[in-house]
Amino acid sequence: MTDARLPGYWLTEMRFNDLTDKQWRVFTGLLMWSVEQGTDGHVPTRYVGTVHLDGVDDADLEALVDCGVLERVATGVQMLRWDDPNGLRQSLAATVEAYRTRKRENQRASRAARRTQVVAGDMGGDVTGRVGGGYSSNSSSSAYTPGNKAGDVTGDRKRTRYDFSAERMQTVQPGSDCGPGNHTWVADGTCTRCEKRKDAAA
């Protein structure tokens, strides 16, 4: 979208104050049409009449010629001193297009920079570096270490089962008998709660 410039000091210039309301609207309409279409002040004949609902007649155009803001040409009208800072003070179409191109390139570069940051981990840190080594395929399925009653995990995450044969289970009550079906047998054939042996109980 482009915008036509209407300097505030035009409100006090006699040449504009001498225009009728319609002629002022024709002038600003021609100005905006040319800015929007990028024609640097040229408005073809077929479009001149579209800038006002009541149409544009010769008297309207002659008033603007006398005002010094346009001239009539074979193909329509040409607004004068289009990009002159002391004239109509509008931007040339080439200047507007260069600005748009520069803006598109800046936006494209910004998007590329953001994508690069995401890939490099700059947006939130290196995710893989913060998670850790993860699960190793060399690890065993148990979290218990040999001889470690509490089952602590070693620093390198290698895991083995607790070795119950490392120490002999002792009976709780010497001379006692849990009774048929109540024994808790271990690998060496003894009960963990009484002095019975599995082979003797059978």
Image (cartoon, rainbow, N blue to C red):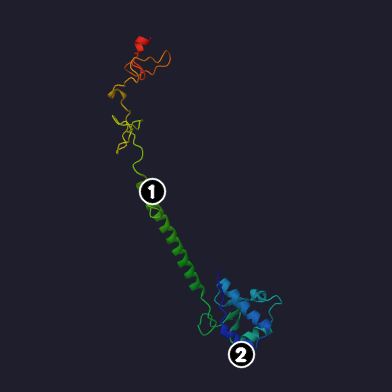
Q: Nearer the viewer, residue 89 or 92?
A: 89
For marks 2 and 1, give the one nearer the viewer: 1
Report the residue marked by disc 1: 127
Residue receiving disc 2: 14
Residue 99 seen in this snapshot: yes
Residue 88 in the image: x percent, y percent?
55, 82
Q: Is 121 situated left or right of 36 in this image? A: left
Label 1 CA crowd tier, 10 Å (few <14, some 14–19, many 20+): few
Query: Dot 2: what SS?
Result: helix
Q: Position of residue 32 (x, y in %)?
A: 60, 75
> In percent of the image, x 47 and y 64: which residue is there?
104
Judge whether residue 75 can be spotted in this image: no
User: What whole-number distance in Å separates the C-alpha atoms at marks 2 and 1?
Assistant: 69 Å
Q: Quadrant of the C terminus?
A: top left
Tag 2 near tag 1, CB within 8 Å: no
Q: Which residue appears at 48% of the width and 73% of the height?
A: 95
Name the foreground residue: 197 vs 195: 195
Label 1 amino acid? Answer: Val
| Identity of the residue drawn at 47% across and 66% down | 103
Q: Nearer the viewer, residue 76 or 101?
A: 101
Residue 57, position in %: x, y? 69, 81
Disc 2 residue type (three-letter)? Met
